[in-house]
């Protein structure tokens, strides 16, 4: 007896491709529990023409996956709250419309609107000069573009799995190649999973270095939240081991760096770099709590897998993208050359791989929010907490 | 009783999309007047794969709209004359094939073949260094590319309207987003309309600044005409208030700047910058008259909405694109930094918008051409006319 | 009586397009000889979404043509051997996913995996500064990108021809435009042909300069072979008139420049520049022979049409792309400015064209390999052979 039902939706290698696909709990005789649905469809028109989406609706939470944009998560919604934000970028932009070299390497911003998008895999962070391998053996000085190429690389393999026994896990797996000759070549295999009725979902990523030589890797999960969670008085909760402002601008907000102001048309972003405490297994959790403390979004991850944590406060006017980013990463979103100097750029061995898991959840009601707050407090209890009021050259480029 | 029949053909927000659509006067019982037809179709093959076109054929004039290329107008034809030109670019190039940063920022030219395409909206004109806003609050020095991004931005909304009473106005409306995070964000809503049997069509544009902060805006209507209108002895007619050559090359042609020579393989473009007189409502009109004075194309617009007028004479060999551009704009197609220095770059307030209307017409036969000439003469009659034989630093970068 | 059956599969000008097409010998009553098949299909999913392929299977050899990538040849296979290689780039990448300006002009490498792809037509070779024409008549200094634009330009016309009498030639013709305003404008018409049962195929290219002014042209056929032909002890055979190493790195391998080592993870490419002898009609032939001397691939071409021959040895690890390139060209893959200085950049006159023909074949078994070796030896017999152990400034930039 099969433990899993599996259906491949796309496999570029064999030129197999389903433009649409729908699977529901009704397709499984005798499956008890909340009704659920998995739905693949393709957007048409404008800059989103040809973009593929897969929705997993587990009956409590609906998760919108974007295989065409590197298996990012567009949004996750329950009846009570929507995780995500209102970017100025209103369409789910197809990568062929994104020219990353435009605007001095900031072109990535013309497609940025996901609740979670990956930055990497060869580099992420601010645009800046760095050396890349070239064909001749000589390194070549180039201008790296903002946040790398993975978010604009489409998945070339996609499948759906349904566990046939309780808890009836539902999952969607995509595979994304980020490869070229004479350069880093990665394969990301990402599985998004949840169970019927749950108010959370997991992201399990495997990143493989397909090269026969070691490669540098940078990976940051750019997790973005706007209203209703974000609002005046919203708070970020984290088991802080260390925190510092990125620059003079962030330093200005040091005295309320863990809380958020209202939308402010004149606001300029403030960024804080952190290290976090975890439990005995290095698992940690961060949360964004709404002003009324009735709702929260949480992200659980490993401080071993993702030792760098960045908070991006961007409380501009709502029309301009009132948003905060909670960003676990292998390192910080500075230029790669700076991160390399500080010894924080990861290396994947030849043919090697690494695994990274995150869990995104919603806490609903004062009781759940309080429990989440307690959980985060316990992680830091009795441990070092150092909040530097000054820019720290170990973390922040001059 | 409805005054209008309306049919939405595409709405990206709701993922509604019709690949083809056809509507004719025969669909409307009892509608008198010339037969007409509106036809949406999608091009296949080569660099035009996926490009959407909408044709409005009003029975006298056929107008080809390109929603995929920012609601440009590919050509407009009557039985007697075709408005447009024969670019070296033979296909209607899909934006995903245009790399605007290529060739030192001249990549826009690999898709340029419309009778009317918009240049803008954040910038237009020659490539050049300028400052753009970045995420960090610091301005970033970048190389702006030729003529901006609007012509390579596809419409994400499209609808057809038919007025159900005389004059039975036919119109096609498209909406184009030109947006990014941390940068100017515009929405262009363009309506192309005409009436059955007319030898003219209108373009009514609304440009909205979606940001909560004011944004600079530059917009130029690059209107291009080749044979049969253009030929040796063709003339441009305009109610000239002021005119000057752009550079030494244009100065060489100063003594015949209002007439055109034959195709000349060695010709290098000559550009003239003008200000025009309008009527009491600031409406003005310019025309290109064919050598035999039997046909003319006219463009009517407002000198308040579009105070800058540019003439582009590019009478190269026919194979290379024998063409002239009559280009009403909010400012001149110099680099944005130069235009800003001269105080000519428009500002749209936060959430603000502006409206711009143009009417493109055909005059057919000596009588109509003479009437058009008289109309243009009257606009300038008894008013200042200053034609500078010299390059004027107020208009022309050194 | 028709000599040829012809079927147009795509004609962008008339918006005619067949997504799939299949034709076999069974469609022709009374056609004797080996069964054959021609098959057009479109890839779906990932970065290859929308890529068109045409396979000609002549019963002995199958040739995979990629109209979407400038009529390149993905691979050619017989029962015994596959000509081509295993690039890190696993998908047949659609040009809209290739940003050639990325990575300092090396973005072309993110789509490179063909057995034969063309580099050109305005420029090829290493990225580097050069002057290009601009609209104003002034030349503009730009950074040319690696290997030009033709390989990322899709065919806009495609047809199939079948000769109705012996030898029943099968051919596929595609037409690719590489054009822009104020720049070089070319049309490539490429016919790939073979006959049922043959172990070879021809490529007949016509390149037309559509401009009314002369244009520089560079064209290199990047022909790439990996295992099973390539392996430790494989040899390149050529009627060498002159050969020299490109740089110090190539000089290191001078004593075994005609043979190949095993996959070596630390290998850095070695490149050799050659001039070849031809027969009385300037036809020549080069070959790659497998280590066991049981198989060989051959390329026949004209030293008048393609006077420059380049060997690219890139025996990196198999995962990184263990491959050699045998590259006949109009000139060498140095920067265009260097090649111009040496007088090697071709000029196409206004409206002019040039024709280039290559034949790709497979020799199977010791006897055929020996015959090929003899043929190549005879071309050089009694003629000058100069192998420079030193970098020659006439061929190699400092």
Image: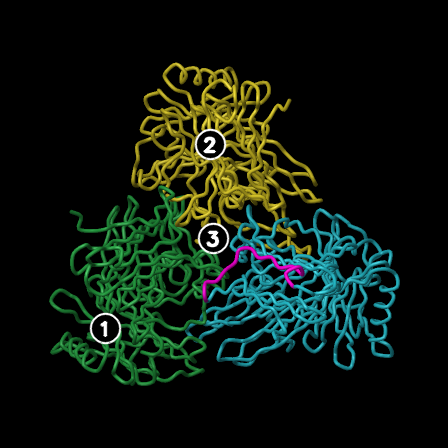
Chain colours: A yellow, B green, C cyan
Residue under the point 52% across and 37% down: A220
The numbered disc on residue A301 is none
Relative to the observer, which residue lies in front, C255 or C298?
C298
Residue C396 visible in the shown view: no
Mark 3, mark 1: which one is toward the viewer? 1
Q: Residues within 10 Å of mark 2 (few under 14, many from 20)?
A: many
The correct choice, above or below, for B285 with respect to A266 in the image is below
Span of residues in magenta? C14-28
Relative to the observer, which residue lies in front, C155 or C337?
C155
The numbered disc on residue A99 is 3
The residue pinned by badge 1 equals: B286
| Secondary structure of the residue carrying numbered label 2 | strand
Residue under the point 49% across and 71% down: C183
Circles 3 and 1 in contact, beta carbons < 8 Å = no
Where in the figure is residue B190, as x and y percent of width and height? 28, 56
Q: Residues within 10 Å of mark 1 (few under 14, many from 20)?
A: many
| Secondary structure of the residue carrying numbered label 1 | strand
Mark 1, mark 2: which one is toward the viewer? 1
- Residue C25 falls inside the magenta stretch: yes
In this rendering, do the residues under marks 2 and 3 share a single chain? yes
Circles 2 and 3 in contact, beta carbons < 8 Å = no
- Residue B261 falls inside the magenta stretch: no
The residue pinned by badge 2 equals: A244
Where in the figure is residue A161, as x and y percent of width and height? 56, 29
């Amino acid at each position: 007896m099969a433990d899993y039902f599996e259906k491949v939706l796309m496999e570029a290698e064999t030129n197999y491709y389903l433009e649409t696909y729908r699977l529901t709990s009704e397709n499984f005789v005798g499956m008890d529990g909340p009704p659920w649905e998995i739905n693949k469809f393709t957007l048409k028109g404008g800059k989103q023409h040809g973009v593929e989406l897969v929705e997993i609706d587990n009956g409590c939470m609906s998760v919108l996956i974007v295989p065409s944009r590197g298996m990012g998560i567009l949004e996750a919604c329950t009846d009570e709250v929507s995780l995500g934000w209102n970017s100025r970028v209103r369409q789910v932009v197809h990568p062929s419309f994104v020219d990353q070299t435009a605007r001095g390497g900031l072109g990535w911003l013309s497609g940025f609107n996901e609740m979670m998008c990956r930055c990497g895999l060869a580099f992420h962070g601010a645009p800046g000069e760095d050396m890349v391998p070239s064909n001749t053996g000589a390194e070549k000085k180039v201008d790296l573009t903002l946040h790398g190429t993975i978010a604009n690389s489409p998945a070339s393999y996609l499948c759906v799995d349904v566990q046939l026994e309780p808890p009836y896990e539902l999952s969607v797996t995509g595979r994304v190649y980020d490869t070229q000759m004479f350069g880093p070549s990665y394969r990301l295999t990402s599985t998004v999973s949840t169970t019927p009725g749950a108010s959370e979902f997991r992201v399990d990523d495997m990143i493989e270095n397909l090269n026969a030589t070691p490669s540098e890797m940078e990976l940051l999960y750019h997790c973005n939240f706007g209203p209703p969670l974000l609002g005046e008085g919203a708070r970020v909760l984290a088991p802080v081991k260390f925190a510092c402002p990125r620059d003079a601008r962030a330093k200005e907000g040091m005295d309320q760096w863990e809380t958020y102001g209202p939308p402010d048309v004149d606001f300029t972003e403030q960024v804080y770099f952190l290290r976090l405490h975890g439990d005995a297994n290095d698992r940690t959790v961060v949360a964004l709590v709404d002003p009324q403390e009735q709702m929260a979004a949480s992200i659980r991850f490993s401080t071993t897998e993702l030792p760098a944590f960045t908070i991006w406060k961007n409380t501009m006017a709502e029309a301009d993208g009132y948003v905060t980013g909670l960003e676990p990463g292998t390192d910080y979103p500075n230029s790669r050359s700076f991160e390399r100097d500080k010894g924080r750029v990861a290396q994947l061995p030849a043919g090697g791989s690494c695994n990274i898991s995150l869990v995104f959840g919603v806490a609903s009601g004062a009781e759940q929010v309080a429990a989440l707050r307690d959980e985060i407090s316990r992680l830091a209890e009795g441990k070092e907490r150092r909040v530097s009021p000054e820019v720290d050259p170990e973390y922040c480029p001059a």
